[in-house]
Image: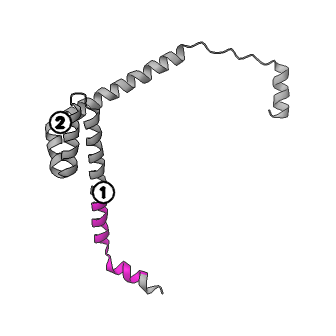
Amino acid sequence: MSAAPLGAAQDYPLLNLFWTMLWLFVWILWIFLLVRIILDIFRSDDLGGWSKALWVIFIIILPFIGVLVYLIARGSGMQKRDVRDARAADQEMRSYIRSAAATRRRRVPRRSSASLRHCVIRAC
């Protein structure tokens, strides 16, 4: 009964395992690139609705050529939009932190030393 797993391991050498892992990594990278480009198409402000639809159709019908053409034609714009969005998010976070820090905090009543001793004894 143990001969079957051993036979399967001998039919699939270590180099094939590395080759499979490489293809899996390339496939995941390709899916990531497609999603990233489609998100960039819809995030772009300078494209209209029909041109966004045409880019997505082009990328879906001819994925390799579509992605290559998009990266050549609009690749530098992707980086500029990323930087712009990161700066906007950073500015929004900083303004929120400033507004939260500027609000008046509620005063917490101080406990007397007798009640603190009582807390230490009872472990409250």
Q: Is residue 11 magenta?
A: yes
Q: Earlier in the sequence, mark 2 or mark 1?
A: 1
Q: Is residue 105 left or right of residue 81?
A: right
Circle 1: element type = helix
Identify the disc placed on residue 9: none
Identify the disc placed on residue 74: 2
Q: Which residues are magenta?
A: 5-25
Q: Residue at x 31, y 60 (%)?
A: 24
Disc 2 or disc 1, which is closer to the eye?
2
Q: Residue at x 85, y 21 (%)?
A: 114
Please name the residue that numbered disc 1 is placed on: 25
Q: Residue 43 or 100: which is nearer the viewer? A: 43
Mostly what secondary structure, the magenta segment?
helix
- Residue type at mark 2 is Arg
When the figure is inspected, residue 101 is found, relative to residue 62, above or below; the finding is above
Residue 81 placed where, x, y %? 26, 30
Instruction: Determine the image quadrant of residue 106.
Output: top right
When the figure is inspected, residue 101 is found, relative to residue 19, above or below; the finding is above
Instruction: Determine the image quadrant of residue 117.
Output: top right
Residue 16 placed where, x, y %? 28, 71
Q: Is residue 84 left or right of residue 51?
A: right
Q: Residue furthest front?
A: 50
User: In the rendered view, how is the structure colored?
Assistant: one colour
Q: CA distance from mark 2 to mark 1?
A: 25 Å
Q: Residue 67 or 51: which is nearer the viewer? A: 51
Q: Residue at x 35, y 24 (%)?
A: 88
Circle 2: element type = helix
Instruction: Determine the image quadrant of residue 86.
Output: top left
**Crowd band around label 2 with a 10 angstrom C-alpha radius: few (<14), some (14–19), many (20+):** few
Q: Is residue 45 magenta?
A: no
- Residue type at mark 1 is Phe
